[in-house]
Image (cartoon, helix red, strand yellow):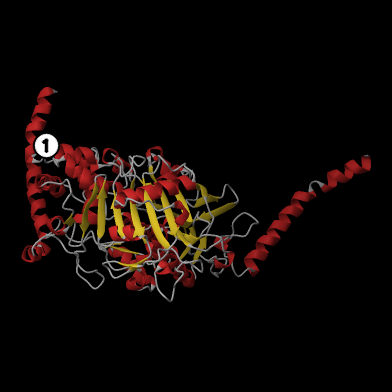
Amino acid sequence: AKVKSTTCHLVFPILPMLRLAFILYLWRYVGSFSPKISSFDRILCLKPLFSSSDKDQSLSSKRDIDNDKLRVVIIGGGWAGFSAADSASSSSDTEVLLLDASPRGPGGLAGGWRTPILKRPVETGIHGFWRDYRNTFDAIKKIGLDENDILTSYTPSILVSESGRVAVAPVLGEGESSSAQISTNLPEPIRDIARSLPPPLDVALLSDFKSSSPLSLIDRCSAIGALGVWADFGQEDPESWRRYDKMSAEQLFLGVAGVTPTLYQELVTPLLHVLPMTPGYDCSAAAALSCFHVFALGSKGAFDVRWCRGSIAEKIFNPWATLLKNRGNVDIQGSAKVSSIVQNADGKYEIVVNDGEQLIDCDAVILAVGGTALKRIDCPKVQNQIPVDRLRGVTCVAVRLFLRPHPLETVTKDGKKTQLPPDIAKAMEESPVVVCGPRVVSELAEAGFCIYDLQRMQDDFAVSTENADGNGGSEPCAVLEVDFFRADSFVNRTDEQIVDLTLKAVSAALNVENYIDSSDVLDFSVVRARDAVSHFCVDSASYSPSVKIDKGMYMCGDWIDRTGHASWSTEKAVVTGRQAVAELSRDFGIDCITDVIPVPKDTSELAALRNVAKTMRTALPDGFIPQAPWMVPQIVNALRNR
């Protein structure tokens, strides 16, 4: 027993020393001989570093161990994250690590994947590219891609409200990527005049309104009441955002602009439910004005939109990742969920990944995540400046239906073929895209949705002799995508129940008597994105941070710097990614490519209206919002009754 005790006393102190020596040996071995791991990659763990769904695809660079490059970690692998990585890695003085929580590959929510068995392409919703996405198109060009190879031509859109089809919005911009103009009920001479009018008059006159629409002439004329607030609201003016962010879009349009309830229901509500993706009572008036300006009213053809001709991950993000890889100073790690970010005493940052499996030290951090994702990251520096508990998200559900092809192919007005049932193909003949407001069926009281005929939009599904199956080697089929926004009321239903609801919603929106029978659904995918899309509720701009939190800590995304560059969605993410790196470059004295293309200038007509609004505002009390003339008596009576 005495010998055993003595042996233990001699051995136990030696074991920690041996363990330490072994770790140091591994550290030196990895740093000296591994061609895939640099000094920046030395994470305090013994698991493979850049593990992802395809380890052979992990991007690593070969750099000297004792380099003095600026080490930048970008958290988030969507448009904002890739935009920031692209700009940050444009300097040879940086070493960039992009952490993507998704296990499926690059692109985040914008990316996609293929079903495991039949290898059919699936995405978390379909994403549009509007005509004024100048920086997004610039990013695509710099990847080395031709827009016309990966995007469709500009397409019209069919608008549907709870009372049925409202109108078809035509393509109004000029250029080789515009589809043919659709017909309207206007005589040709008046149509020519309408084409020359500034927005929004051109859209209002050239849109093909259904003859049975409940919109009267008075309803349409009531939209004039919104001109005052549209001119008064400065897209990149913090004071305008502060003023209008405190009221809801519903209050603005009905109580201030004085649009009729019918116009609000038929036109405003469907657009609110699919652009900012939220009902009017829960949407900031500032967000609504900004969103409508960017997507529909700001310039000629602003409502024109193109679509990716396949999965965005495969068409855009995979080539983008390859470009970054070839620069030699970028690493991308998939399946990397950041738990916390702490600034050390020396000013550098320590990032904890996957609940402590990895620790990363760096000089600067760029957060490229959504508001609700930010809640799950413990970061005192950010939480001290942003009320993260107030950040909200919109729940979306993307349903892709692979349908038995109808034996009769339909050729639509755009010259494309579809194998959808003839009555559905007929209802969508003017456009492969249908934009639907809420309450189309009773179960969708607050959910708007979009319907897409993917055989007319994506190469993988096109009807052709060369690609007869169109589905990755599976049997031929027609393909409908239906994306729901504000889907909280049914997101927890089973996949089968959601598919049944989708079939019902499609039939109601397109006003076809016969549902698509569930037996004709050969395959389907239901993707749930809970609280995943930025929610621009009342007062949300007040806690939208700027791109710079502090030296070494930056943010980008579609909800960042809302009062800055007047862009939305993908375009805003790309812009703020570049702006975040511009701040980083100034702070650390490095030279990165961070050029941002400004938004289009106001039309001369809108500029004149804005000058009038500015003159009036100098004589009006702070906080005053221009009322529609016919609303003044009602406001006076309300004040008297108070």
Name the secondary structure under disc 1.
loop
Q: How many labels sit on residues?
A: 1
Amino acid type of the residue that numbered disc 1 sits on in the rendered structure: Pro
Residue that lies at the very extreme toward the top in this rendered image: 641
In this view of the protein, which residue sits in the foreground, 377 or 399? Answer: 399
214 shown above or below 155: above
User: Residue 181, located in which quarter of the rendered image?
Assistant: bottom left
Residue 328, how many percent across, how many down?
Answer: 49, 71
Horizontal side of 270 relative to 355 (left or right) equals: left
Q: Is residue 90 visible?
A: no
Residue that lies at the very extreme toward the bottom in this rendered image: 466
Residue 408, how many percent across, how many down?
Answer: 37, 66
User: Residue 308, located in which quarter of the rendered image?
Assistant: bottom left
510 shown above or below 90: above
In this view of the protein, which residue sits in the foreground, 83 or 187? Answer: 187
| Residue plotted at (42% across, 76% down) | 465
Q: Which residue is mark 1?
A: 621
Horizontal side of 623 relative to 50 (left or right) equals: left
| Residue plotted at (47% across, 54% down) | 519
